Amino acid sequence: MTVNGNATQNGHHARATVLDIQQRRAEAGKLLSGVASVGDSSRFRGPQTGKPLAQSFAHYLSSETKLRKPSRLKEAGRFLKNKPDIISVAGGLPPSDNFPIENITFNFKNPNLEETNGSLSGDQSHLSATLGKYDTKDGGADYDLSIALNYSQTTGGPQLTRFLTEHSELVLHPPYADWKILLTTGSTGTFETLVRAYLDKERRDSVLTEAYNYSTVLETMRPQGIKVFGVSADDDGLSPSNFDEILSSWDETARGARKPHILYIIPTGQNPTGSTQSIERRREVYAVAQKHDVLIIEDDPYYFLQLGPYEKGGSVAEEPKTPEDFIASLVPSYVSIDVDGRVIRIDSASKVLAPGSRLGWVIGSEEILQNYIRVAELSNQVTNGFSQIIVWKLLETWGHEGYFKWLAKIRKDYTQRRNVLLDILDDQLPKDLVSWVPPSGGMFVWLKLDHSRHPDFPKRSLEEIEQEIFEEAVNQGVLFARGSWFRAEPDTPIENIFFRLSFSTATKENLTKAVQRLSAAIRKSFGL
């Protein structure tokens, strides 16, 4: 089966709209659920008629996961799914009367109002919400603190699951039928759970990833005995030809590992390089994954931070006004072209709402997520209830249209922040020694140093030169991330020197000082 946009060989499947979601909600009526209800996302999907079912990838399960059985106590929760009035004496759930918190009131920004001269005035700029302990009984609400602050299922509660399932359907439009989502404790915990579910040290499993990648992910795999191998990349992201070449010529003896069956990628605003794969590149990479039967873990925290083109001193383009236009402005996710169910997408609230929420969600086939649950339900168990109910109330108050407006606002803000740093780099850095490509997403700029012009090269190693510049920069009063920290294969020789700079937090004044200090450290090392 092949993919062309949203069409498959089985026919065209129309993408749901916000209006479709609203009509579906109205027809479904009140969401009835109690304590420890299962958040089954299949309840909240639109019709999947005509779509194929996902392929099975059970042959890649780790020995640990194969031995795992469903938690008997968690499994009992399935009886609560369609019977909210059932009387349960099965679980050791504390009585909500013993919870000391009676209500929570919080204020939050209103994305539905247009800004005037860069700001909103008075009370219009914020909304307010109050969450009570017994809102489902007293006020007819879908969710309250008596539910959120008690034990819950590993799937997450149905209330937030419903909104995020609808959101995923609007944005991703998966082309196979049995896709689902689960709430998680964030991207790092999600990835660690997937490593345990689908990778095995005793089996000598390995993973492919971009040659430079998020250091925390690399540090998650190595202590578990999973070997990591890097695939080369260009300005458009991971190279499909090198991906194919590595797999086609794989030598288990020489590599000391089995042929990889997992590709881990950050396709949008890649960390650390800032590149964003085009839809054409994603299709090419996906085709190689199909050829070699590889699962793709798509870690996409920067998906909504797809930044526009950069022009020094130029203005930032206005964001689309409708949800449909905003979605159309995004490069489609790997999930959107996944006709096999081989993509596991990791989503997170960290970059679009708040990292301290420790809340995310994972999207994949029903089979894959069922095996994910087997590991998660006996480790981190559930997303914390405070985060679930606060984020639920925030998103439900905004509505889908308001949430898309919020995403558009923060994308514009990150674009402006990126442009500020790029302008400063252009003014302050020695461009005969340092080069960079304007990032097309995320929150980082990836600088490349021309080490061939260093007076001590090749007498000194690139590691020593990188270390010298780093230490001098710290002495000058600026901290950046060294490129060597992100190498997928740290035991191989360094071929280039890179630095990663973030534009997400620092003010223009501090960014200027930071780049000036970095420039001074580089010039000193080069004897200029």
Image (cartoon, grey):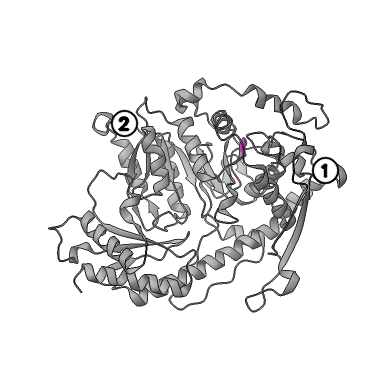
130 relative position to 52: left or right:
right
Please determine whether, in this image, residue 121 is positioned above or below residue 438. Answer: below
The residue carrying mark 1 is 136
Q: Tell me the element at label 2.
A: loop
The label shown at residue 239 is none
| Image-based side of 354 in relation to 226, left or right | right
The amino acid on which the numbered mark 1 sits, given as a three-letter code, is Thr
| Residue 342: image location, x then y, percent | 50, 37
In front here: 150 or 325? 150
Question: Residue at position x 61%, y 60% from top?
Answer: 407
User: What is the C-alpha distance between the residues marked 2 and 1?
Assistant: 54 Å
| Label 1: which secondary element | helix
Residue range in magenta is: 173-180
Question: Residue 500 location, x and y as percent?
Answer: 37, 60
Image quarter (top left, top right, bottom left or bottom right) of the C terminus: bottom left
Q: Is residue 392 visible?
A: yes
Q: Label 2, on which residue?
A: 257
Q: Is residue 396 left or right of residue 208?
A: right
Image location of residue 60, percent across then percent down: 45, 28
Label 2 or label 1, whichever comes before in sequence order: 1
- What residue occupies the far left of the structure in this picture? 459
- Asked whether disc 2 touches disc 1, contact meaning CB atoms under 8 Å apart, the reply is no
Which mark is in front, 2 or 1? 1
